[in-house]
Amino acid sequence: MSTNAIVTAMTTAFGATTPSQQQIDVAKFTPAADGLIALNAHLASRSTISGHALTSEDASVYVACVEALNASNEALTHARRWAAFVSARGAAKLSGGVEARALTHANAPTFERAPAKETNEKDSKTSTSEGGKKKEKKEKKEKGGDGGGKADTPSSKRMDVSVLDIRVGVITKAWEHPEAEKLWCENIDLGEKGVRQICSGLRAFKTHEQMEGARVCVIVNVKPGKLRNVASDGLVLCTSNDDHTEVDFVVPPEGAAIGERVMFAGFEGEPEEVLNPKKKQLDAVSPDLKTNAEGVACYKDVPFTTSAGVCTSPLKDCFIK
């Protein structure tokens, strides 16, 4: 298929450029070295060319630059992440046998889920010499027939951000927790039939006025429970500095729909219905949740992305909890 045909097909799949997005000078994003550097810098705080949904601009720049990205020995982390995103979404959306050109260079980021841990040859021989006793013991533990011992590993092989169901919400009501001076109680609209009640340890950092009406990102598939006798069904994501003297919200962009799921390029798996604390999935993912130098919320440098753009926080280079 010709380049023009690919651009046309991708444009149809992604959507046309809006007038507000036409102000971006995409002509500078060329296959030349300086053009790729400019593209990489532009995408440092955006998931797409426009900062919103994928459009014809992404299609044309992608087709023009992807081969140069493949051939480049420069890091170009943001441009490669964007190209992988366009490739993945394009391949999923395009019809008629059209496929987005893959980003195949050795320097391109890989977003494959980690395989199950393999044993080395020495371990394999040791295991064999023990007559399969370890395997038998493990099977007993998984079936609960070994007296309730700890499981060696979580049963799920998927330990990346896609297990989290993060949604865009807005706090409609906030009140002081009756039994805990550090907690706010909130009603949060997440586009569901009713509001969710969540407790957050933000009393030392947010006033009542700052709480109500705040747009937030919420993990909605944590296991419901009670915090000091008050029901809580979700986790409001916030950034914090190292000494926990500053805490602020992870904020979805204006235009992101209430209830929309926050996505991560290359991590498009379905979330767990409810996270199982015994599997420690949230514990495994949390260390890689962080804002970058521009304040963009990321998982392993991949932005929190909505249809309206990326999620941000006033606190830069801080962990997200």
Image: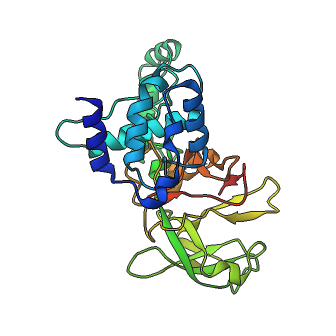
Compared to residue 160, the image places residue 185 above or below, namely: below
Q: Position of residue 271 (x, y in %)?
A: 41, 54
Q: Position of residue 108 (x, y in %)?
A: 49, 27
Q: Quadrant of the C terminus?
A: bottom right
Give the residue at x 62% y 82%.
212
Compared to residue 130, the image places residue 178 above or below, namely: below
Of 197 and 87, the residue lying toward us:
87
Of 7 and 164, the residue lying toward us:
7
Farthest left residue in view: 96
Q: Quadrant of residue 175?
A: bottom right
Q: Position of residue 158 (x, y in %)?
A: 44, 42
Q: Quadrant of the N terminus?
A: top left
Compared to residue 33, the image places residue 187 above or below, namely: below
Colour basis: rainbow
Of 2 and 119, the residue lying toward us:
2
Q: Position of residue 77 (x, y in %)?
A: 57, 33
Of 278 and 198, the residue lying toward us:
198
Give the residue at x 54% y 37%.
28
The answer to whether residue 315 of the structure is visible from this angle is: yes
Residue 219 falls left or right of residue 44: left
Residue 260 falls left or right of residue 14: right
Q: Quadrant of residue 97?
A: top left
Give the residue at x 51% y 63%.
222
- Number of numbered discs visible in the structure rendering: 0
The answer to whether residue 145 of the structure is visible from this angle is: no
